[in-house]
Image (cartoon, helix red, strand yellow):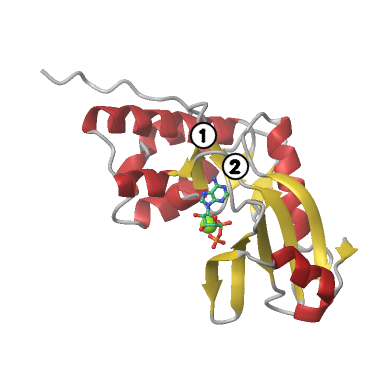
Amino acid sequence: MKRLKHDDYLALRAGATVLEADSFGDKVLRLADGTMLKFFRRKRWLSSAVWYPYAQRFADNGEALHRLRIPAPVIIEVWRIPSIGRDSVHYHPLAGQTLREIIAEGVDPKAEQALKDAFTRFVIRLHDCGVYFRSLHLGNVVYTPDQEFGLIDIADARIGRRRLSRQLRARNLRRLLDSAGECDWVDFQSVVNGALQERPRSL
Ligand SMILES: Nc1ncnc2c1ncn2[C@@H]1O[C@H](COP(=O)(O)OP(=O)(O)O)[C@@H](O)[C@H]1O
Ligand SMILES: [Mg+2]
């Protein structure tokens, strides 16, 4: 991981917009040139982040997803920024909007069911490819102009070689199903079975 000097960091972020922040400071910036800078802090000292930093995992997962032909941010650089005690990943945003943004803007009901079915098929595809996306919720899935789904916020995804078991598929949906507004976006049974189930046609 390259080190970024404080002055260079300040130059990089000049004119940036803060997209996400918490009580510890900025979390995600949109830089003046439209690229994104996401920060990671080490939360605990005795953590696997010491030997495998989250910014690096983000970048490695991005490459692994590209190899699987799953849209994900294209990485520009991974930085350690000692002056602010953060690691960061600099990347191009994925073209498109998150599903959460699309829903907030309003989707017409016919298009909505088609999008939900396509999303369920996408989750099945992730699982078939061995991707366990821990942060699976609609704010971390982007719908691209090519009408594909892609993933952002990929630092804690696990990408293995084998397709996921039924148990893992079910477990991966827990967070999505627990959220009141988003639980009907995925068809649980189809995901666990690994195939989209035909819905009886309404009369
Ligand atoms: N197409 C996109 N590509 C990347 N980030 C996007 C995109 N669209 C919106 N974002 C926004 O970028 C920010 C960073 O996302 P994320 O990595 O999920 O941050 P967080 O850790 O705060 O959830 C969020 O505000 C997200 O909505
Ligand atoms: Mg997120």
Mark pair 1, 2: CA separation: 8 Å
The residue at the point 45 percent across, 25 percent down is 195
Amino acid on which the number 2 mark rests in the picture: Leu
Distance from mark 2 CB to nearest ligand 1 atom below 8 Å: yes
Q: Disc 1 marks which residue?
A: 144
Residue that lies at the very extreme toward the right in this rendered image: 2
Q: Disc 2 marks which residue?
A: 94
Amino acid on which the number 1 mark rests in the picture: Thr
Q: Tag 1, which secondary structure?
A: loop
Asked if labels 2 and 1 touch by Cβ distance under 8 angstroms, the answer is: yes
Residue that lies at the very extreme toward the left in this rendered image: 203
On the rendered image, what quadrant is the C terminus found in? top left
The residue at the point 27 percent across, 23 percent down is 199
Q: Is 21 left or right of 187, judged from the image as shown?
A: right
Distance from mark 1 CB to nearest ligand 1 atom below 8 Å: no
The residue at the point 78 percent across, 63 percent down is 53
| Residue 85 figure quarter | bottom right
The residue at the point 35 percent across, 34 percent down is 116
Label 2 packing within 10 angstroms: few (<14), some (14-19), many (20+): many
Q: Earlier in the sequence, mark 1 or mark 2?
A: 2
Indicate the position of residue 158 as horizontal and vertical percent values. 67, 48
